[in-house]
Amino acid sequence: MLYLSVDQGQLLTGIIAEHGMQGMWMVWAGWLGTFVVPLVFAPLWQKMDFITDNQFLVFRFPGKSGRILHLFRAIYVGGLVVALSLCFHLIGFARALQLYLAIEPSTSILITGSILCVFALKNVFDLKLKMDAFHAVVYFASLIVILFSLWKAGNGWDGIFTFFEKQPEKRQLLPSTENSSSWFSLVVFLGIQWWSCYLFDGGGPEMARFTAVKGKKHAVWTGLLPIAISFLLSFIVLAQIFIVLGLPHQNSNPEIQYVEQIFNTIPRALKSLVLLGFFGMFITTAESMMNWGASFLTMDAYKAYVNPAASEKKIRLVSFGTMVFLSLVSLIFALQIENLQSLIKLTFSIAAGVAPVYILRWIWFRINAWSQLSAMLSSAVFTLIYPTIHDLIPLKTYPMAESRVLVVTLLTTFVWVLVTFLTTNQSAEVRLKMLPILGSRISFLKRFALAISLGILFLGIVAFSWKMILNS
């Protein structure tokens, strides 16, 4: 939930411009489960020594089925999911480059994709750590420039509320009583999406942060720090978005309007610094995603199943090749996608119904490899076919993206639970492996309940804070 990139600013600008503050529940709903990873799963990952979270699958799911899931997820996530995530960041920076250089959108996407391919070839972990620190410094310097420039252009504190004065209905956090579509979306965000699409167990690129520290307390604090940063930055970024939306504009796409207004207001001499700041956070995030995808494709697919005897030099070459491949695939996706909001909602749907498997597999030992495999496959298939059936079901009067999340969640859950009980029960063997790491299922559930309670409290604080700000 970090707000440290130009693409996040574009996404939120598009959401607020279209839906007002009610649309922010799509993002804020994630706060409900935000403490689960640091308080529940970070200490568990810290006990294990895996290069990628995918290797946990071979440990958790015994036999041939575990190896099949391991290979499938390496290719599916390492190839498709990572490419979609890269595409999100690629589009965000390409728009900044487009406005800075005054070039066509397709040209800026091609240039950005080419830059990504070049950086894939120099993406060495030790060098990345040093460059990430430099990128962060440049970004925060550019953020100060952006805040000062927008504050000045928008006439200070008053400029924050200009957008809502022009469109007062978008100031409200809750929909009007007669707006059934907006209430439906809100129910999906708060009742389904946060646990069905958001709430994973801390695997993915962030898992390495938990395994790298010493001790449970360090793992917990490693998970809590990004939450604190996100909370503070969310107020700063939303304030500048409000100013952007209140300024006169010509571009009909509010996502692009975010970048356009920034470059229109900052001094000419500082535009290069701001572009470098955007680039720094883009390349830092993109390289992390490429490292994650390349480790899946290289270590979990190529080395594990194609060439177990591969030398370190060979592994390095394959890794660089997979990062270039991911860059090219994300470039192809970027050329087909018009706005970031539709892309993020698509990724929510692809994950719908899958997230509970990732949580429950730690304590429900009856879940097996076929359970997770069927969940991943069915959510993808149902996501693809849903647009063809939306007008044929009772939910056709409601927004398609939210309806899709609901339907895909129900269908995917039915499929993986059914598969769980129709396939071999390996719970006795799994219990022997998992209990030494888990400790006690009762303590797990207590920590989980505490994390959710804190999430509810935190969401209440966020909503109450914005209600007070907007009504001031």
Image: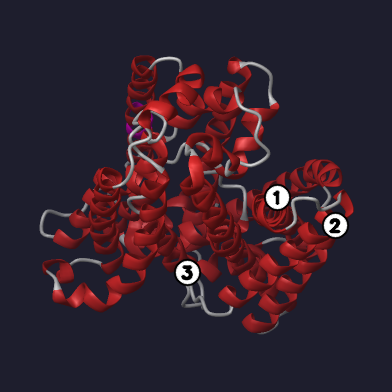
Mark 2 = which residue? Answer: 314
Instruction: Indicate the quadrant containing the C terminus: top left, top right, bottom left or bottom right.
Output: top left
- Between label 3 and label 1, give the one nearer the viewer: 1
Q: CA distance from mark 2 to mark 1?
A: 11 Å
Q: Secondary structure at mark 2?
A: helix
In x, y percent, where is residue 19? Answer: 33, 61
Q: Which mark is residue 254?
A: 3
Quadrant location of residue 236?
A: top right
Q: CA distance from mark 2 to mark 3?
A: 46 Å
In this image, 45 relative to 350: left or right? right
Range of magenta residues = 457-461
The amino acid type of the residue labelled 1 equals Met
Q: Nearer the viewer, residue 342 or 98?
A: 342
- Look at 57% across and 44% down and name the residue there: 54
In this image, 137 relative to 326: left or right? right
From this view, report whether residue 27 is shown above or below residue 466: below
Disc 2 or 3, which lies upstream in sequence?
3
Q: Nearer the viewer, residue 443 or 2?
A: 443
Q: Is residue 165 visible?
A: no
The amino acid type of the residue labelled 2 equals Lys
In x, y percent, where is residue 84? Answer: 55, 64
* Label 3, residues with CA under 10 Å away: few <14, some 14-19, many ≥20: many
Q: Which mark is residue 299?
A: 1
The amino acid type of the residue labelled 3 equals Pro
In this image, 372 relative to 296: left or right? left
In this image, 431 relative to 307: left or right? left
Q: Secondary structure at mark 3?
A: helix
